[in-house]
Image (cartoon, rainbow, N blue to C red):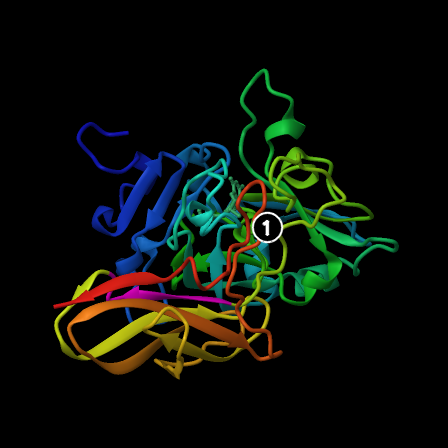
Amino acid sequence: WAQGSPLPDYVGWKNADALIVHSANTLETKRDAIGRGVLTPSDQLFVRNNLPAPDAGIMQDIEGWEVNIAGVNHPRAITLAELKRIGVETVVSVLQCSGNGRAFFPHGASGTPWTTGAAGCVAWTGVPLREVVRELGGVAEGMNYLTGTGGETIPAGLDPKTVMVERSVPLAALEQAMLVWEMNDEPLSLAHGGPVRLVIPGYYGVNNVKYVRQVAFTAGQTDAAIQATGYRVREVGVSGSPDQPSMWEMPVKSWVTSPLASASPGRTLIYGVAFGGVHGLAGVEVSVDGGSRWAEARFLGPDLGRFAWRPFVLATELAPGEYRLVSRATDDQGQVQPEERVDNERGYGHNGWKDHGVTLTVA
Ligand code: MSS
């Protein structure tokens, strides 16, 4: 990237102070950069690319970008200009990498050592995929999955199946799937998947295919490695295979965002974020003693729907000393964020509240 710049070129417009640069393809939002608002500002949102981002040239004619729709009764390619005439909706959802929280796994799971910042909450504007499908005569018979293919050029000499970003999710996700062209009221940037991205609200980041080239309804899941063996939850030391759970629906999760290290004695406001994944939230509790005693926190700001996160706050009185701040959310199905992580080879899906705690010194 540009000499002296803290950020790679394709994300040069981002706020470097709010980000941890793990590599050119992996940028994490700092824990204390998540503010009190519901929406994560675009210039602070994390970035994760499995392959280098495509050339910026793909953003030159965004209206002409084509998405091939297959596995419907009248399959064909459809341009962004045409998608924009079919319908439009805005959905707010949490975008979270499958590996968010990986740094907390004691076995040193391989992959980017994200703590809390491979997640954000953004507004997506686009057309519900089901409306596009209706336009094309409905889903063809016998299809069980929705398979999205990314628009990256596969580096020469590599077997496409081993590197391509192609993900399948259960057909039921058609209920909320979207083809989006705006994020936070601005044209979708290349970094976040412009010209057009497949968004599956409530599902882990990897299923939200950027620069989407094809959306296919398929009988089985794709055999691309990212689906067949990647993003599979298995015990430590075991390799990935299609019979293991895939990183699809996200469960309930929360963490404290402030204060993170020190505070002065007296009245202290403890902030954080909580979300229910595919479900809405019922509530979130905070403990300042590592989980012995809990107090109900208050949600801050508007409820932007079941896929959005909710900032929360708890006002408390703290005398000088050491505290362990933890938070524990409950979704509207009554599922409570668990205390412990579930150890697994690649460090996926960590929503245990204990590891996400912070030690606070009040002096
Ligand atoms: N898409 C494409 N096309 N490519 C790539 O690489 N990645 C994934 C998603 N999508 C990719 C895609 C991931 S993995 C994630 S997280 C996400 O994306 C991120 O996003 P942003 O926007 O933030 O960057 Mo993990 O589960």
Residue 224 lies, with reference to residue 245, above or below; the image says above
Name the spot of residue 36 as percent of width and height, x first: 29, 71
Can residue 354 be seen from the camera position used here? Answer: yes
Between 82 and 280, the residue placed more toward the observer is: 280
Residue 320 lies, with reference to residue 229, above or below; the image says below
Task: Determine the residue positioned at 28% across, 29% down.
Answer: 1
Q: Element under label 1?
A: helix
Asked if ligand 1 lies within 8 A of label 1, the reply is: yes
Tell me where residue 59 sits by quadrant. Answer: top left
Name the spot of residue 309 as percent of width and height, x first: 44, 70
Magenta span covers which residues?
Answer: 253-260
Between 8 and 206, the residue placed more toward the observer is: 206
Between 173 and 126, the residue placed more toward the observer is: 173
Amino acid type at image mark 1:
Asn
Residue 288 lies, with reference to residue 361, above or below; the image says below
Q: Is residue 93 left or right of residue 17?
A: right
Q: State the quadrant of the C terminus.
A: bottom left
